[in-house]
Amino acid sequence: MRVFFDTNVLVSAFLARGLCADLLRLVLSEHTLATSEVVLAELRDVLSRKGRLPLPQIEAIETLLRDRPVAPWPQHTLELGLVDGDDEWVLASAVLAEADLFVTGDQGVLACCNPPLPVLNPRQCWERLRPSR
């Protein structure tokens, strides 16, 4: 299964222990993690500003992610009516990446009425990918 993580899930996975970190390890070992230029740009910014990670660590994270499918910047959004315009670009990227699942902690995206692919929070994704082990 091809899984696309929103920036907030990747930030949590790389900055904290917990469900998002476990989910990232599961996807990397048993599925295909896809990302995009949009997410990589956001991730670099957040990891340096809020995470205060040193540049070599950010570069190592980006290298890890670039070893997987990376969608280019979309030419347009899907015009889903999301409150945050950046989320429109990320979802369009997930479609370009041919993702089977989009994983986010963003309530605005989770509430989307007509998503172009299944949108799950990290717990729902964990339960779907790792049922009753």
Image (tube, grey):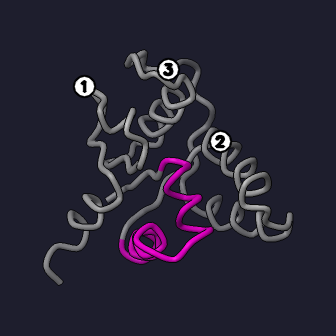
- Give the x, y percent position of residue 85: 54, 22
Closer to the N terminus: mark 3 or mark 1? Answer: 3
Amino acid type at circle 1 is: Cys
* Residue positioned most to the left: 132
The Cα atoms of the two marked residues, 2 and 1, are separated by 25 Å
Q: Name the residue under label 3.
A: 77
Circle 3 SS class? loop
Foreground residue, 16 or 87?
16
Q: Residue 37 carries which label?
A: 2
In the displayed structure, would residue 116 be above or below residue 132? Answer: above
- Give the x, y percent position of residue 120: 29, 49
Amino acid type at circle 3 is: Thr
Label 1 environment density (alpha carbons within 10 Å; few <14, some 14–19, many ≥20): few
Does the CB distance between marks 2 and 3 fall below 8 Å?
no
What residue is rendered at 42% in x and 20% in y?
78
What residue is rendered at 72% in x and 61% in y?
51
